[in-house]
Amino acid sequence: MQDIAYELNLEGARLARAAADLAQAEDNRPRFVAGAIGPTNRTASISPDVSNPGFRAITFDQLRAAYGEQVKGLIDGGADLLLIETIFDTLNAKAAICAIIDVDARRAACALPVMISGTITDRSGRLLSGQTPAAFWNSVRHAAPFSIGLNCALGAKEMRAHIAEIGRVADTLVCAYPNAGLPNEVRPLRRSPEYMAGLLGEFAAPGLVNVVGGCCGTTPEHIQCDRARGRGQDAAASARGAAAPAALRPRSLHAHARDPVRQRRASAPTSPARRASAS
C-alpha cells in the first residue's frame, strides 16, 4: 500500500484531529495530535545479507523520499507535532529529519515541533545501529528537537538507566513511553496499569522525564493511571516553580504563528533538577 502512503497519513491525522477536538470540547483541556513517523522495515546502516556486509536494501535518498510523503500527509491532515519514533537505526532518523526540512522549505507555515524517540534493542544498551543513548542524542541534536527519549525498547524497568543517560547530556525535554507487554489477545503478556504508572512515576519524581506515555500493550486504562500519577508530579513541579514549555498549541485553535525552536530553547530546562515538570 506504499502508493497511498500520503492518503493514509492524511486521513489518519484528520481522524485524530477530529477525535482530539471532540475530547477537548468536553473538558476544555488541550489535546494535541502527534504524527508518528515509524522506523520503516528497512535499515540504512546495516546489510540484511550476512554474506555481503556492503549491501544495503535501501538508500538514504529513498528513505528521505518515503518519509517526505508521510510527513506531508500528517501535516495536511492536522498534526500538531511530528514524532520520529522507535528508531533502531540513527541513519533512518537522519533521513526523516531531512524529509521534514524538505517539506518545511516548501511551505510558508512555521515548522512543527519534532519529537525524536529511539529504541534500545537488547541489554547491551545500544540501538541496533550500535549507538549508545548519548551518541544517539549527539547524532540528532542538530535538529533541535522539542524532546528526545526512548520508547518500546526493553520495558520500563530496564529503560530507566538509558533515559537517565540521555537526560544527562540532552539540552531539551526528555520523553519516555515504554511498552507494557506484548499486544497479544490470545495470551496477553501485559503489565498492569498500576504497575506501569508506578514505574513511570519513578521516572518523573527525580526529574528524569517531561513527557510520558505507553507503547506496545498499552490500553486506555494505562494512560488514565499514568495521568493520575502525573497530576501529583505536576503539583510538585508547580510548587518548585518549574515552568511548562510553551511551544505547543493545538492547530485547531491557533494558526502556525510560532517559532517552536526558539520557544523550546527559551523554556527547556537545563538540568535534571529543573526537568521535573512532567508534561
Image (cartoon, rainbow, N blue to C red):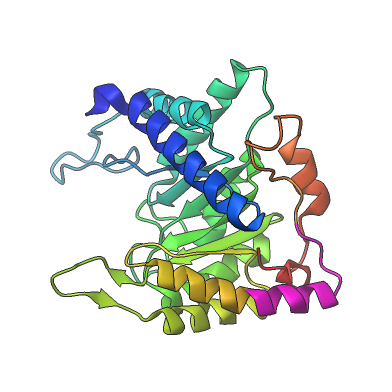
Residue 77 in sight in this render? yes
- Judged from this view, the residue extending furthest toward the right is 241
Q: Residue at x 57, y 80 (%)?
A: 201
Number of residue marks: 0
Is 90 located above or below residue 153 in the figure?
above
Question: From which residue to which does the magenta span run?
Answer: 231-244
Q: Position of residue 229 (x, y in %)?
A: 59, 79
Q: Say which quarter of the image contains residue 157.
A: bottom left
Name the residue nearer the viewer: 25 or 170. 25
Q: Position of residue 133 (x, y in %)?
A: 51, 60
Name the dominant secondary structure of the magenta segment: helix
Is 73 located above or below residue 25 in the figure?
above
Whether the magenta-drawn stretch holds residue 77 is answered as no
Q: Position of residue 115 (x, y in %)?
A: 57, 47
* 5 relative to 222 in the view: left or right: left
Q: Residue at x 67, y 42 (%)?
A: 144
Name the residue nearer the viewer: 51 or 22. 22
Q: Position of residue 100 (x, y in %)?
A: 53, 29
Q: Residue at x 21, y 29 (%)?
A: 1
Residue 59 in sight in this render? no
Position of the C terminus by quadrant: bottom right
Is 194 located above or below residue 46 in the figure?
below
Whether the magenta-drawn stretch holds residue 239 is answered as yes
* 260 relative to 215 in the view: left or right: right
Q: Residue at x 50, y 64 (%)?
A: 213
* 107 relative to 226 in the view: left or right: right
